[in-house]
Image: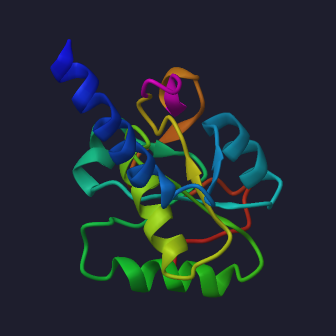
Amino acid sequence: MYMISRVLPFIALVFVIATGANAQVAQITPDAARAKALAGELVLIDIRRPDEWADTGLADIALKADMTAPGFIKTLLDIRAQNPNIPLALICRSGNRSGFLTGELYNAGMTDIIDVVEGMSGSGVGPGWIRRGLPVRTTDTPVSVDIIARQP
């Protein structure tokens, strides 16, 4: 018990520091992200790897930007340039990578960036895009014609 009482404050401090970077980043659920993308109020970007896109498919309205690719930042900037007044929403598998990345981008000065919590497959926060029954597409199927954003 003594050990727990000594370690618990440290764990709480680490949690506060780790989540502090994302304190200013907006968050949105997958269903709300889809509705806003269809309304032209945000651009959804799937930041997972191509093998993950192939495994589960992509959100029907998501642009692709592999965060592990060398040209990732350029792709994001190109999407931003094509949609200068529309927030960018990032989605990954479970919300971990998108949460981290949106915080880092915010800290680097990028505004209008949104984290899609839950991700495609869900997490402790919620069921995610797929289990919510939201539409998906294959990697070689174009983005839904219902949105204005286009892949650069």
Q: If the image is split into quadrants, where does the N terminus sit?
A: top left
Side of 52 where 59 appears, left or right: right
Spot the residue most to the right. Answer: 39
Measuring from the top left, give residue 104's x and y in whole percent.
43, 69
The residue nearer to you, when weighing 48 against 8, is: 8
Colour approach in the figure:
rainbow
The residue nearer to you, when weighing 100 against 13, is: 13
Side of 148 where 73 appears, left or right: left
Measuring from the top left, give residue 83's x and y in whole percent.
69, 79
The residue nearer to you, when weighing 46 against 143, is: 46
Spot the residue most to the top. Answer: 1
Identify the residue at horizontal 74%, vertical 71% (top origin): 86
Q: Is residue 60 magenta?
A: no
Identify the residue at horizontal 58%, vertical 55% (top origin): 23
Q: Quadrant of residue 114?
A: bottom right
Side of 100 where 108 appears, left or right: right
Residue 142 visible in the snapshot: no
Measuring from the top left, give residue 139's x and y in whole percent.
38, 52
Identify the residue at horizontal 80%, vertical 61% (top origin): 40
- Eyeballing the image, is 29 above or below 49? above
What segment carries the magenta color? 123-129
Measuring from the top left, give residue 43's x and y in whole percent.
65, 63
Q: Quadrant of residue 71?
A: bottom left
Spot the residue most to the left. Answer: 3
- Eyeballing the image, is 35 above or below 130? below
Q: Main secondary structure of the magenta part?
A: loop
Side of 42 where 132 appears, left or right: left
Identify the residue at horizontal 19%, vertical 18% (top origin): 2
